[in-house]
C-alpha cells in the first residue's frame, strides 16, 4: 500500500550550498549524506552513472519534503520534468521566458485557482517552477501542487488512481478545450499529502532521468514494495527497475525506480528497519 509522498527530488550541483538555500526559505535539513553509494540498479534511469552521489533531505512545516540530489551531470536552464507550484517565489529566482509555459499557466488557473501564475527559474538549482503572484501570503515556501502533462489522460488517470493509490478530486467538463483531472495523495501525515493535476498535452516531451535538472522524480512511501510495484506494472508503468537496498540516515530502505505511462519517474520506498551505525 502506498501511504503518500515521501519527497520530490530537486537536482543540484552543490549539496551543502543547496541545503543552506532551502533553510533560508523555511525548510529544515533533516540529514545530509555525501558520497552515498549509487546502486547500479539506478543506472538505466541516469544519463551519466557514477558509483557515488549525495543527497540532503529537507522538510517544510507545510507541503511535501524536498530531497536535493547531486549527481555528476552539469545542469542547465530548461523546463522541469514535474511542474511544481510553490506557495512563494523562492529567493534567488528569475523569470522563465520559454514559449511552452502558457499551457501550464491555464492549468494552474483552472485547477488550483491561481490568479497570476508565474514561471521562474530557481537560479542556484537551474530549476524551473511556478508560483502564484497573488497567493504569496506565507512567510515560508512550500509545494502546493504538481502538474504532469500527459499524452493519454485516461491511461494516466488509471495508473495514478489504481496503480499509485491517488484519489480523484475533480475533472474537466465535457467539451473543454483540454482534458484534466485533479488528484490527491491523502495521508494522516500532512507532509505526505500532495495535489496532482494530470492534463492532456500534445507537446513533445524529453524523457526525464534522475539527474535531469529541476524536479525529475516523485518518491512514494510503500508498505509492501513488491506488491505496489506489481500494481504499477499492471496499471501501465512502462519501465520498472530492479529492487535494491540502501542504508541512509540510520534506516535500511528497500527501493525500486519505475516510469509511468508518460515516462514520468517514481521512486517507491519501503522502510525496512533502523540500523546501527558502526563507529
Image (cartoon, grey):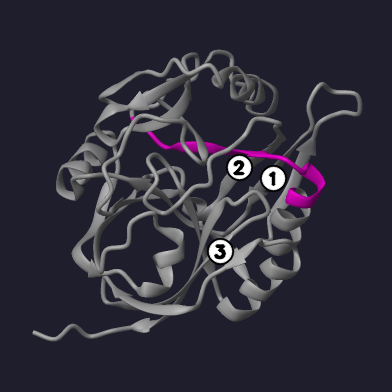
Sequence-first tag of 3 and 2:
2
Give me the residue at 22% from left, 44% from top.
Answer: 13
Picture layout, residue 145 above or below residue 135: below
Q: Residue at x 76, y 47 (%)?
A: 168
Q: CA distance from mark 3 to mark 2?
A: 20 Å
Vertical comparison of 249 with 24: above or below? below
Quarter of the N terminus within the rendering: bottom right
Horizontal relation, residue 139 to residue 100: left or right: left
In magenta, the rendered stretch is: 140-156
Is residue 175 found left or right of 179 in the rendered image? right
> Tags 2 and 1 in contact by the CB under 8 Å rule?
yes
**Residue 215 image offset from top left, x and y in percent:** 43, 43
- Residue 191 forms part of the magenta stretch: no
User: Alpha-carbon distance for marks 2 and 1?
Assistant: 6 Å
Tell me the number on the disc at residue 195: 2
**Residue beneath the point at 46% across and 38% down:** 143
Q: Can you tell which quarter of the image residue 180 is in?
A: top right
Which one is in front in this view, the residue at disc 3 or the one at disc 2?
A: 3
Label 3 packing within 10 angstroms: few (<14), some (14-19), many (20+): many
Between the C-alphas of marks 3 and 1, the distance is 20 Å
Secondary structure of the residue carrying numbered label 2:
strand
Q: Quadrant of the C terminus?
A: bottom left
Query: Badge 1 is on which residue?
Result: 183
Amino acid at each position: 500500500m502506498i501511504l503518500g509522498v515521501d519527497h520530490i527530488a530537486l537536482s543540484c550541483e552543490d549539496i551543502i550550498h543547496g541545503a543552506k538555500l532551502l533553510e533560508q526559505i523555511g525548510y529544515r535539513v533533516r540529514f545530509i549524506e555525501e558520497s552515498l553509494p549509487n546502486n547500479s540498479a539506478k543506472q538505466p534511469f541516469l544519463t551519466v552513472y557514477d558509483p557515488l552521489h549525495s543527497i540532503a533531505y529537507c522538510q517544510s512545516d507545510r507541503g511535501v519534503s524536498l530531497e536535493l540530489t547531486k549527481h555528476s551531470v552539469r545542469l542547465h536552464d530548461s523546463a522541469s520534468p514535474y511542474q511544481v507550484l510553490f506557495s512563494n517565489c523562492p529567493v534567488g529566482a528569475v523569470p522563465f521566458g520559454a514559449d511552452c509555459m502558457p499551457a501550464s499557466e491555464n492549468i494552474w488557473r483552472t485547477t488550483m485557482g491561481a490568479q497570476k501564475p508565474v514561471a521562474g527559474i530557481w537560479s542556484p538549482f537551474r530549476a524551473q517552477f511556478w508560483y502564484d503572484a497573488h497567493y504569496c501570503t506565507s512567510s515560508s515556501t512550500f509545494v502546493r501542487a504538481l502538474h504532469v502533462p500527459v499524452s493519454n489522460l485516461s491511461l494516466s488517470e488509471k495508473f495514478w488512481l489504481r496503480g499509485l493509490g491517488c484519489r480523484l478530486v475533480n475533472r474537466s467538463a465535457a467539451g473543454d478545450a483540454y482534458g484534466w483531472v485533479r488528484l490527491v495523495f491523502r495521508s494522516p501525515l500532512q507532509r505526505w499529502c500532495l495535489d496532482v493535476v494530470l492534463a492532456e498535452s500534445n507537446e513533445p516531451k524529453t524523457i526525464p532521468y534522475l539527474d535531469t535538472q529541476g524536479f525529475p522524480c516523485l518518491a512514494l512511501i510503500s508498505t509492501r514494495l513488491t506488491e505496489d510495484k506489481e500494481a504499477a506494472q499492471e496499471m501501465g508503468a512502462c519501465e520498472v527497475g530492479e529492487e535494491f537496498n540502501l542504508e541512509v540516515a540510520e534506516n535500511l530502505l528497500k527501493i525500486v525506480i519505475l516510469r509511468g505511462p508518460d515516462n514520468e519517474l517514481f521512486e517507491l520506498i519501503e522502510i525496512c528497519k533502523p540500523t546501527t551505525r558502526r563507529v
